[in-house]
Structure formats: structure tokens, C-alpha cells
Image: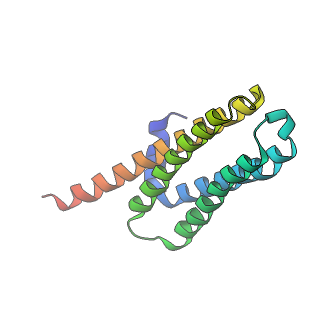
């Protein structure tokens, strides 16, 4: 599904973006903090680094689920915030992977780069939805 179709769907269902992001964050935290830790020898990412990276999606999931259940008005502000921190997380993941480049295996690089690609795509959709919702709100007040 192209990004513009996802953005259109997200504009019609902005609160559901929090659920998608939240469940993705839970999955990411589980993979990083449990699965990859158990399979460290195959991925080459140090255990402490995996726990460090897993802590961010845990926080993001709490934020996402809170927003889904509590935010009724002006979701674009909160969607923009999670989009920005998702981009930050992508950059952080890449920097941490580069820092450990000498121990990360090809499988580890594959995981990191796939996760970055998915999170970045979601962040782009979130930021586009936030921008479109904000534009729609502003155009409503322009006569």
C-alpha cells in the first residue's frame, strides 16, 4: 500500500495510528529485549545495547496507548510527536549499530536496517497525517 494511501487512511482514523504504533513498539521491544538477547551470538548486538534500544519502544508504547485511550481532540499534535521520536529512534538505532559495527553480524544488520525502514515509513505516515490534519483545521478557519 503506497504511503499516500496510508496517509489518507490515517487521516480518517488518526487515533488508530496510535494503536498501530503502540503494537509495533511492543513487538520491537519484545524482539530486541527478549528474542535478540537470546540469540545474541547470531545477531552480534551486545546484550546491553539490545536492552538500551528496547527501552525506547517500551516508552513509546506507553505513550501510544495513553494517546489512543485519552486523546479525543487535536490528535495531530500527539501524532506529530510520536512521528518525531520515531525518527529520532531510527537515527539512534543507526548510530548505535555503527558504533558496534565490528561485532554486529549480517543478520544483526539486516534486523536493524529492516526495523529502521519500517519505523521510518510509519514516522513518515504519522508526520504526513499530522500535517494534513493541521492543514484541514487551519483551512476550516480561513474564510
Q: In the image, residue 11 lies at what x, y percent?
A: 43, 52
- Give 42 or 57, whichever is nearer the viewer: 42
Q: Say left or right for 42 vs 27.
A: right
- Give 111 or 95, whichever is nearer the viewer: 95
Q: In which quarter of the image is the N terminus?
A: top right
Tell me what residue is drawn at x 58 percent, y 35 percent: 117
Q: In the image, residue 93 lies at what x, y percent?
A: 60, 42
Q: Is 49 placed above or below 57 here?
A: above
Q: Is 67 placed above or below 7 here?
A: below
Tell me what residue is drawn at x 86 percent, y 36 percent: 41
Q: Is 44 placed above or below 79 here?
A: above
Q: How many marks?
A: 0
Q: Quadrant of the C terminus?
A: bottom left
- Give 126 or 109, whichever is nearer the viewer: 109
Q: Say left or right for 99 vs 43.
A: left
Q: Quadrant of residue 95?
A: top right
Residue found at the far top of this picture: 106
Residue found at the far bottom of this picture: 70
Tell me what residue is drawn at x 44 percent, y 45 percent: 8
Tell me what residue is drawn at x 50 percent, y 52 percent: 85
Q: In the image, residue 122 lies at what x, y percent?
A: 53, 44
Q: In which quarter of the image is residue 115?
A: top right
Amino acid at each position: 500500500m503506497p504511503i499516500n494511501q496510508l496517509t489518507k487512511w490515517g487521516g480518517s482514523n488518526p487515533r488508530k495510528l496510535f494503536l498501530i504504533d503502540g503494537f509495533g513498539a511492543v513487538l520491537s521491544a519484545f524482539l530486541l529485549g527478549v528474542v535478540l538477547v537470546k540469540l545474541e551470538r547470531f545477531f552480534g548486538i551486545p546484550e546491553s545495547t539490545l536492552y538500551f534500544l528496547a527501552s525506547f519502544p517500551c516508552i513509546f508504547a506507553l505513550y501510544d496507548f495513553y494517546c489512543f485511550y485519552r486523546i479525543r481532540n487535536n490528535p495531530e499534535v500527539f501524532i506529530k510527536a510520536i512521528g518525531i521520536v520515531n525518527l529520532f529512534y531510527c537515527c539512534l538505532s543507526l548510530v548505535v549499530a555503527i558504533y558496534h559495527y565490528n561485532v554486529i553480524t549480517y543478520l544483526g544488520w539486516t534486523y536493524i536496517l529492516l526495523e529502521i525502514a519500517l519505523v521510518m515509513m510509519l514516522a513518515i505516515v504519522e508526520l504526513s497525517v499530522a500535517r494534513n490534519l493541521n492543514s484541514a483545521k487551519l483551512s476550516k478557519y480561513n474564510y
